[in-house]
Amino acid sequence: MLSSVLIKKLGRTCFDKALEQGQQAGVRAWAPSEDQVIGGAGNVLQRYGFDPLVIVLKSAHLAQFSLNDCSVEGDEDGNPQTLEDLCVKLEAQSNFSKSNSKLIRMKLLWKHSTQQFLSLSGPVQPLKKTGEPPLINGWIPYLGKALIFRKDAYKFLLDQQKKFGDIFTVHIAGRYITFIMDPFQYVYVIRNSKQLEFHEFANKMASKTFDYPALSKGKFPELKENLHRIYQYLQGKPLDIISDHMMKNLQDIFEWKCSQATDWETEKMYKFCCSVMFEASFVTLYGRVPAADGHKVISEIRDKFIKFDASFPYLAANIPIELLGATKKVRKELIHHFLLQNMTKWLGGSKVVQARQDIFEKYELLGDYDKAAHHFAFLWASVGNTIPATFWAMYYLLRHPEALAAVRDEIDHLLQSTGQKRGPTYNIHLTREQLDNLVYLESALNESLRMCSSSMNIRISQEDFVLKLEGNQEVVLRRGDWIALYPQILHMDPEVYEDPKEYKFDRYIENGKKKTTFYKAGRKLKYFLMPFGSGISMCPGRFLAMNEMKMFLFILLSHFDVELAENKAVRLDNSRMGLGILLPDVDIAFRYKLRSLRN
């Protein structure tokens, strides 16, 4: 039998969540009384005898976790017809192992706590203030439209746009998110950085995901500002230096990995990209592991990184890490690699990482583990999206022979014009200007980014205010409301991009030069390609990421013949919708061999 203290704890957690939601959303939220929630939670817990681990979990988090691994069909809007219908389909379609009693108990807690909340709260009343956008609430408490949004955010948003126009608010997992669908209105959101803030949201999410204390001004004065200033090392002359190191490291890894491929070698493409790009980024940023088995050490770190990264969408959705199997253990092991006593052994690290170390040492309240967690977060930011983006760039080139031929001709011409020889035994040097002038390579890369990017640009309203938009439009926002731009809608808009679902490697070329002018409804767009975010949320490492991907493809295509070894289509895995570059749903085999020096 559970203790009354533990029962009370879960009841209090449930009530606090409902109360918090009510305070943030005013009359839009459902919120039963404290006695009702605590009583309902107690009845469920006593009936099923949950262990202490489950008791301390927030029911809202648990609901998200359960639904993240289930696909539930419903009515035309994606809502289950009845609560019983939902429960039956959860039982039938859940990925949970039936032998795992803890997960089954978690599922039961979600089901019965939802029944309690529905019976106590009554129907949701989507009341709104004058001037607020249409509200799409959903019928499941706390979750709202989270289920159907996660299943296919792109389709869901297009459907809502057809029904409600270019501005509407969706209730998703306890948040009220106002989507701005018109790309001509983006600028009014992006430039309004005083009332619409990004860094606080990013700070909270990152601190929970990577296990370091939030960068509060009281505890760590000016730490956030000091870290932001370090991004100067990723621009201008410092960018040239770190890009040169990246090029050398990429060539070394290709030589070590592929120099003996005189006959066809076959590998899985995503695994190959991950192996090369992870090690090149790690060595460039943090330095070489001096041990004789340095490649093996980095491979072990990479394997742990892949395990952690598989749980990243859940962590970003605020799912407790305790629910995610071995993820907490893996994260701790990864962070320990970046403790100072380990990092001091690595040779030739970058100035940007050294500058971060110097700043961390100034804050006595920042423990050794916390500093290491910051370094791990920086590694994830460096490769978490770059690796899948590299895969898609390579995949689309190999799927389209005419694109592969055009890019390879451009690469060969540059080598010939600069008197450089190709082959794994020759070191190639590329200046920033030379990289920038590879217009076919850059266009092909931009096209793959257009097709695989699914980031959601988020801002959070810092106060109740009226957002003024083009055409005398106004949007009434409440403090705590989220504003979101979803560039995938723009990237796949047939008014902007003809045949948007088709890969066209030269889409960003016009008269032999970079094309930067795109139109919608006869008007020129300020924003037409947004894989790296926008405004204050734009990725500070975007220039290095683009250089690294270009250099990877440059070395691959100049040194090797490459072709697909399987004739199968690879599709986007939508589980990371809104979080950046989508991963492939399956890996695909390709083969490579050294090019003849006469070709």
Image: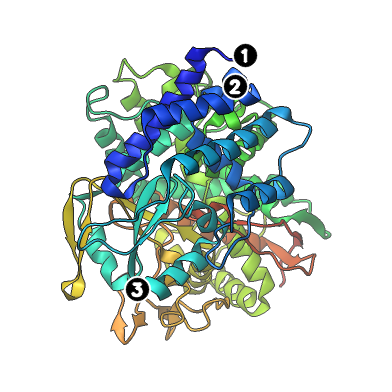
Above or below 237: residue 109: above
Q: Quadrant of the C terminus?
A: bottom right
Residue drawn at (54%, 45%) of the image: 313
Q: Where is 434 relative to 401, above or below?
A: above
Q: What residue is disc 1 on?
A: 1
Residue assigned mark 3: 165
Q: Residue at x 73, y 51 (%)?
A: 258
Q: Residues within 10 Å of mark 3 (few under 14, many from 20)?
A: some
103 relative position to 176: left or right: right
Residues at marks 2 and 1 touching, judged by CB atoms closer than 8 Å: yes
- Residue 156 screen position, x and y as percent: 49, 65
| Three-letter residue code for mark 3 | Gly
The type of residue carrying mark 1 is Met
In the rendered image, the vertical position of residue 121 relative to residue 473, given as above or below:
above
Can residue 347 be spotted in the picture? Answer: yes
Q: Residues within 10 Å of mark 1 (few under 14, many from 20)?
A: few
Q: Nearer the viewer, residue 357 or 75?
A: 75
Q: Nearer the viewer, mark 3 or mark 2?
A: 2
The answer to whether 400 is drawn above or below residue 463 in the figure is below
Tag 2: amino acid:
Gln
Residue at 18% x, 76% y is 471
Quarter of the image containing the N terminus? Answer: top right
The residue that disc 2 covers is 46
- Regarding residue 353, the answer to whether it shows in the image is no
What's the residue at 74%, 67% (across, down)? Answer: 563
Q: In the structure shown, which secondary structural element does the residue marked by tag 2 occupy?
A: helix
